[in-house]
Amino acid sequence: MDSDLREIGLRIQGLRDACDVTEQEMADELKVSLETYRTWEQTGADVPISAIFHMAHKFGVDFNEILTGTAAKLDTYHVVRRGQGKEVDRYPGYSYDDLAWRYQNKIMQPLLVVLDPSDEPAKLVTHEGQEFNFVLEGSLTLTFGTQEIVLNQWDSIYFNPQYPHGQRCHGDAPCKFITIIAE
């Protein structure tokens, strides 16, 4: 069992206990069996992104605080590497509805982006809110001004999009990623 993933489970359990919520109440709220929810807390593995977003909102913490134990400093960005080389076919489990996240009474809908290596790099843009990108296939280069960050499969990044940023395919293979923007 990956110790980093185990730490995620322990953080979820600690937040749930601190908020005086039972395992059954969380399982019901997340619409999963009690057994599935307990596995998430015990291992930290294979917790859907939507469930982590939901728990972060319910417990009043930053998404990254559950994943890494530290709130994201969104003056720039925070990279989260999950998977640790583990081969997991996560993509079929993520439906449009599954990834929607209610944030401050707004529904954030996911956008599936497919990039080809021949595509022109995206122009650097800025916008309000917070942005989350999760790489499903291939590798993604995210440009922040003059800095480039390479994200591989199962890596994610959570950042303040008021800084000029753009994405492009990294390498010779197509890239597929999910982006969610809270405005």
Image (cartoon, helix red, strand yellow):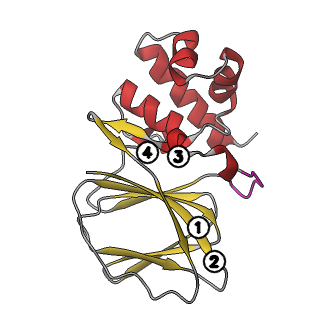
Q: What residue type is labelled 4?
A: Asn
SS label for mark 2: loop
Q: Are marks 1 and 2 in contact (CB under 8 Å)?
A: yes
Q: What residue type is labelled 3?
A: Tyr
SS label for mark 1: strand
Between the C-alphas of marks 2 and 3, the distance is 21 Å
Q: Of the two numbered discs 2 and 4 on the same chain, state the one appearing first in sequence.
A: 4
Residue at image position (58%, 28%) is 10
Residue topped by disc 1: 176
Quarter holding the N terminus is top right
Crowding at mark 2 (Cα within 10 Å: few <14, some 14-19, many 20+): some
Residue 162, label in figure: none
Crowding at mark 4 (Cα within 10 Å: few <14, some 14-19, many 20+): many
Residue topped by disc 4: 64
> Of the residues tagged 2 and 3, which is closer to the observer?
3
SS label for mark 4: helix
Q: Where 70 falls versus 84 (above or below)?
A: above
Q: Of the two numbered discs 3 and 4 on the same chain, state the one appearing first in sequence.
A: 4
| Magenta stretch bounds | 83-89
Residue topped by disc 3: 96
> Left or right: where does residue 5 sit relative to residue 106?
right
Q: Of the two numbered discs 2 and 3 on the same chain, state the one appearing first in sequence.
A: 3
Dominant SS of magenta comes to loop
Residue topped by disc 2: 174
SS label for mark 3: helix
